[in-house]
Amino acid sequence: MWLFVCQCSHSGSYRASRFLMHARKLKQIPVKHSEKQGFNFLALSHRLFGDTCPLVSLSCFQTPQRIPYDEAVQQEFRPAAVGDAFGPTWWTCWFKVELSIPREWAGKEVHLLWDSDGEAMVWRDSQPVQGLTREGEKTSYILTDSLMETDPHNLNLYMEVACNGLFGAGKGTMIAPPDPDKKFTLNKVELVVFNRDVHELLVDFEILLDMAKHLGEKNQRSFQALYTANQMVNLCDVTDPSTFPAAHQLASAFFSQRNGESQHTIHAMGHCHIDSAWLWPYEESIRKCARSWVTVVRLMEKNPGFTFTCSQAQQLEWVRNWYPGLYAQIQDFARKGQFIPVGGTWVEMDGNLPNGESMVRQFLQGQRFFQEQFGKLCTEFWLPDTFGYSAQLPQLMRGCGIWRFLTQKLSWSLVNTFPHHTFFWEGIDGSSVLAHFPPGDSYGMQGFVEEMLKTVNNNKDKGRVNHSVALFGFGDGGGGPTQKMLDRMKRMKDVDGLPRVQMSTPDQFFSVLERDGSQLYTWIGELFLELHNGTYTTQAQIKKSNRECERILHDVEVLSSLALAQKSAFPYPATKLQRLWRLLLLNQFHDVLPGTCIQLVAEDAMTYYEEIRAMGTLLLKEAVQSLIGKLLPTGSETAESTVIMNTLPWERTEVISRTRPTGADTLALVKVCSMGYSVVKDSLTPPHPVRVVKQLDGSITMENGVIAAHLDSMGHVTSLHLVSSGRESVPEGSCANQFVIFDDIPLYWDAWDVMDYHLETRKPVTTLVKPLEIILPGGLRGSVRFSLQISEKSIITQEVILDAMCPYLRFLTQVEWNEAHKFLKVEFPVQARSMNATYEIQFGHLQRPTHWNTSWDWARFEVWSHKWMDLSEHGFGVALLNDSKYGASVHGNTMSLSLLRAPKSPDTTADMGHHQFTYAVMPHLGSFQEAGVIRYAYCLNFPLHTMPADSVQCPAWSAFCVSSPAVVLETVKQAEDRPGVLVARLYESHGSTVVTWLQTCLPVKEAITCDLLEQADPTGHLPLKELGVELSFTPFQVISVLLVLG
């Protein structure tokens, strides 16, 4: 291209017309390739670096560990050279670089050029100073902008090179499992003179060419950009640097031609999305943060107007602990308003699967960190890369001081295009936040003309708003912005033909929207991502552990709070609980809890869960000892009674297993009071014992006076009816508890996606290994067991359990799972008809269609739910409860619970091995609210705590109860930094307006409502009355109350 133009001796108009013709051809190829089409452009690029100088010496040592700088520099280094290979994957190679800058380079800009595989950190004078990675377009470290005589000429630097790329070390493709034997190569290292004037010219040409290409051949400014570039070519002799300033002045004159007042304004903000773990382990993310942010700091030093947004308090905490010098610089630039903490959460968590309290703690831990470390709370929730957004998030955001929201992930939806980029998002309780999706559909732009034009042209809310956001910088694996990105956008700041591009901040942007956004539309309900539906099921052990640890921390806080209320000297374990919560919150990162991570990350996650279990168990014992130590055996005496502790806020009557003095385990039917304990010696007698009867054909009936079930020899439920009414829940000719398996081969995102076409491969599991047999014949509990063969490698063993007085049939399921690209579900066709099914979400529930009338409907062929889902018609329904599953669907009258997947990327071992889980089916009269489905789902997930007790008489003790069945007391904990003050968090669960009483026997002297950050409402003092504290709720409202103990 440039060779032809420069050699042509005809008139300028002829040259321009030929140039334009060639530019039209450029429309068919990517920009990055078009830069390489012409000789002159390449020749100019080759002049970017001038004189070179070899190093004085280069040496290295390797380690499988990620060790601190002080330890690394004490090691024995061996000679190294360009071309050497190092590794394998996840090792670290430290290089010692001795260099001497020639004195004849005085006045020159001098760089250390470093081109290696892997990610590098430059260390100078014991401090990290620059991150380098070829994938992030950072391959040189600026030693000096202009070499002076007083500058050091002889230097020793250290390079810490991680043996992984920006996106890990996938074998063959990005998301493939890591190649454990991959080697990394040092390709080039030398001292170079950097010609800044060449860099400026290259950026000039790039912007002009891109304007010519993307504005279109019928656009006046496209022609003007072409003519300007052509004139620059005529002036510029690549062999004569003295011609460069004139060419650059032509470009500057073009870029100085301003827009009209009506032009769209793009608020550009530096960004560096760093997955806290994904295709690399947690420990590597710590270094990714340091490499990325130290680069940002260097850019801020050279570009005072540059602003950078940074989310995830956990990552800042990592840098604070591991890189204190860098962290101090970050805090300094935060005070200057350039480094801007955003998001308000501990990590960028999954937006679907954490329970309500976990989401509150994400904000509580995050906002407290930002307040303590940076002196302010975040006002915007920043979650650009998670796989959908719960309809309860607006209320939680509002309760944590946040009323703005930014993401872009819904642009990934496979079926429907979301209709807005700027809008109000309203949750299930009516809370509303201002939401913005950057119209460029990216959080990792690079400042190209094409991206800025897409931001304007793709905007769905033209006319209503004239402002949008562009987030620029390499992301996912870190990297962040580059100087070249900044230089591109400086030229586009206000140039005729392009939108205005101004460096901005989240507050500046949202403030403009709040001022001008009166015409914005409102979206009500969840923001459902029509992709990555497999994340509700992948890595089942991680999901089960998450649910279990959420329960453990709930119970520890409840019992520790009760112990504190009983004895003010009880040492509430606030510090230990904070660590456990932070571990849980970290594992709720949006590539860990969803299961889309490599094996190393999954193993780290399970290690953290085990720490929560172990420490949580210890803390539970300490709280129990303080609460009821006087009731527990102290020596060898025989314990004839049982203490039963209930951490839920309602009375429960259930069958428990307990150990008798003889050592034998026996069953007992017990009643225990609300959120407290009872001492039980003898079992209650059920009004109707469980009966289990085997029929001549091998089928079995089970009945407890509440429900009656009939199971065939393969464990199918062929009948399930309510005894009192006779109402049948299984359609005639159908079988419930039907295991089905599907081929599960996504288009690309293996661990992430399950595609709708998998439904076409449905196969019932029909191979019987062990027919149905009776295990417990009845009385307090009846159970039967059977086994099915899924394949030669996988088997299901299930025990179906019915307890006395229990309204649901429970399925204790064990699976040996060794499949590849298969999807296991269990189906329950039910005799109920409704256009919508109901699914539990955080602090509430919502409805989704059971039909596929529209593309919006069938895009929800696989959805997420928490502890229960329900399909009801007027007067009757069926609920499915579970203790650890999230994937679900209801199509027509068939309820499906997703059990196990078998993806092979990025973790070949995902879900392989043994699994145990429980689900239950509960037919009911009336609505699910009237039938108590919500409470029974809690009971399934929060088993009673039992322990032997001396046979002393002790009255039942209840700490809390709530008068309305619609209101759930979800959390009781000590207030942050306020010993002697408890927080009680309640929510309305039925979707109703209700007044209730919170009753307690604790010595409460004052009650004050507060927000989710536990900041007291100045007008929220509640009178303490004989019945307790009176609270008024609207549908799905969450209320927190500070209880000051006397």
Image (spheres, rainbow, N blue to C red):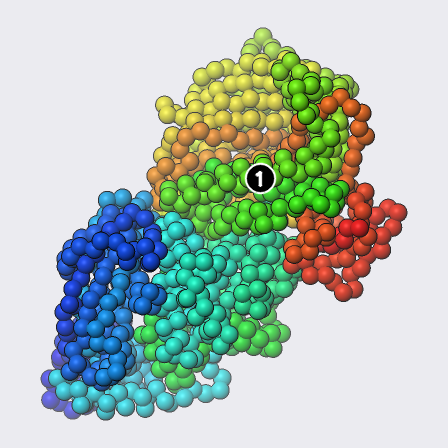
- Seen at 15% across and 67% down, the residue is 56
Q: From the viewer's perspective, tell me whether residue 788 is left or right of residue 673.
A: left
Residue nearer the viewer, 130 or 770: 130
- Vertically, is 601 above or below 483? above
Residue nearer the viewer, 664 or 872: 664
Residue 453, picture quadrant: bottom left
Residue 479, picture quadrant: bottom left
Residue nearer the viewer, 989 or 234: 989
- State the image coordinates of residue 651 (x, y, percent, origin top left): 76, 34
- Seen at 36% across and 78% down, the residue is 302
- State the image coordinates of residue 199 (x, y, percent, origin top left): 25, 79
- Vertically, is 56 above or below 980? below
- Seen at 39% across and 38% down, the residue is 910
User: At numbered mark 1, what does the secondary structure look like: helix, strand or loop?
Assistant: helix
Name the amino acid, label 1: Gly
- Seen at 43% across and 63% down, the residue is 324
Which quadrant is home to the N terminus?
Answer: bottom left
